[in-house]
Image: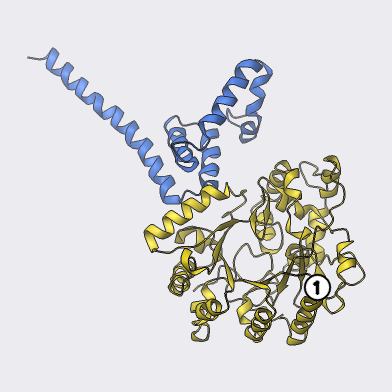
Amino acid sequence: MNTYYDPADLGKFGNISQMQPELAEKFFDWYGAVFAEGALSQREKSLIALAVAHAVQCPYCIDAYTTDSLQKGASEQMMMEAVHVAAAIRGGASLVHGVQMMNKINDVTM
Amino acid sequence: MALATTSLQRRGSDLSSAQYQRGLLQASSGAVSLPTFQETLDGHGIGLLSPLSTEILQVNLGKMCNQACKHCHVDAGPDRTEIMSAVTMQHCLDAIDKGSFRTVDLTGGAPEMNPDFRWFVDELVCRGVNVMVRCNLTIIVANPKYHDLPTYYAQRNVHVVSSLPFYDASFTDRQRGGGVFDDSIKALRMLNDVGYGRAESGLILDLVYNPIGALLPGPQASLETEFKRNLADKYGVVFNNLHCITNMPISRFLEYLVNAGKYDSYMQTLVNAFNPSATHGVMCRSTISVGYDGQLYDCDFNQMLEMPVLCGSAHISQLNVPELNARTIATDRHCFGCTAGAGSSCGGQLT
């Protein structure tokens, strides 16, 4: 393998249970429950997952939740808006630290 | 309205041959070897598929259509001229008189383009069967002679079932052709105006969703909620039920899969998602499908692959219900489309 990421590995996610079955079982049960229809619809949860996938820049998650969002009836516009939400929070998270920088400037200067 | 594509037949494609398509489906897949459908049924102890009833007669009135959708399993389009004759329609009426059919499901192509369509519908209505028409919506606005179809259907309480793959123009037009979404919304408003989709009218307007690519459909109930919310909020359009149908690896969707290099992975997806409980309600167990030439099939998909019913009386003029009820349903790998995930039939999700 000449790359760190192989699309086929997404389908092998379940194999993580081979080395620690009890914890994997707890994780997959919880994961399934998280994405079940609840106070949020399955479509809303899928779009949140898509946004988070972009924030954490996980190629597996982007593949999985692009497909899942389409299957749950999200439109292209909704999906791109979700990516913008992720990008805005990432960008904002950097920029808001500008206040910390300004505080420090004030602290170290006359 | 711009066509999404032209027919495989017009383009002289190998895939316009049913025999070629069957060969492709039967060939062992490149990377991984797929089981046959029968092997999978046997593996789950289901055995051969047999009919439960002959309640629904699905009649294909022809391959002629004003649209040419990219995923069409009929390979229909404006360049197709094969349509059902009035003589064959009369054979269908005779079969209904002696058969056990309670519902007649009219499909195509665009069934309304058959010149004997209204005569046939009137004859069906006289016989008291439930009449269902698979109306592509855009036909209603395609030509002034079709503008009164909503009224015509309403007066006869015809159940209208219409394809709308998405609640926005982008995905709809990509699959069905430029301008199809806007025309579909116009037609839906005309249907709503005469009472279709409104609870108090009793006139049923169902929509059919199919995925916009090599994906399985999501849960029908949540997609229906999304469609209802978006169509009502943005366009003021209402409808009764959303039916989710899986794209079948036949004709133009098969062409897409092959050209996009997605054939193997899509077939693997269907096989992996095999759901034994979906085999109970598959439409072939309660439907007889009639081709434009009167040939009988287990379903519309077998019709397009030219796999007729496995019994002696295989033409509508020779309908023999006891013989049909005793037959074995013809299957092949395309059948994985109807048994994948929550299951799929012309009436939508099965489980």
Q: Position of residue A71 (x, y in %)?
A: 55, 47
Q: Quadrant of residue B88?
A: bottom right
Q: Quadrant of residue A98?
A: top left
Q: Position of residue B9 (x, y in %)?
A: 71, 73
Q: Which amino acid, mark 1?
A: Gly
Please name whichever residue, B15 or B286, is drawn nearer the observer in this view of the structure.
Answer: B286
Residue at numbered disc 1: B99
Residue at coordinates 75% horizontally, 77% vertically from top-left?
B292
Residue at coordinates 76% horizontally, 49% vertically from top-left?
B279
> In the figure, the blue chain has which letter?
A
Q: Chain of mark 1?
A: B
- Position of residue B54 in the picture relative to residue B172 (left or right): right
Question: Does residue B198 appear anywhere in the picture?
Answer: no
Q: Secondary structure at mark 1?
A: loop
**Which color mode does the image show?**
by chain
Please name whichever residue, B154 or A13, is drawn nearer the observer in this view of the structure.
Answer: B154
Please name whichever residue, B83 or B236, is drawn nearer the observer in this view of the structure.
Answer: B236
Question: Does residue B169 appear anywhere in the picture?
Answer: yes
Q: Position of residue B294 (x, y in %)?
A: 80, 77
Callout 1 environment at 10 Å: few (<14), some (14 to 19), or many (20+)?
some
Residue at coordinates 72% horizontally, 49% vertically from top-left?
B339
Residue at coordinates 44% horizontally, 45% vertically from top-left?
A79
Q: Position of residue B197 (x, y in %)?
A: 49, 65
> In the figure, the yellow chain has which letter?
B
Q: How many callouts does the rendering have?
A: 1
Please name whichever residue, B310 or A46, is drawn nearer the observer in this view of the structure.
Answer: B310
Measured along the vertical axis of the image, is residue A13 above or below residue B69? Answer: above
Residue that protrudes farthest toward the right in the picture: B312
Measured along the vertical axis of the image, is residue B128 above or below residue B202? Answer: below
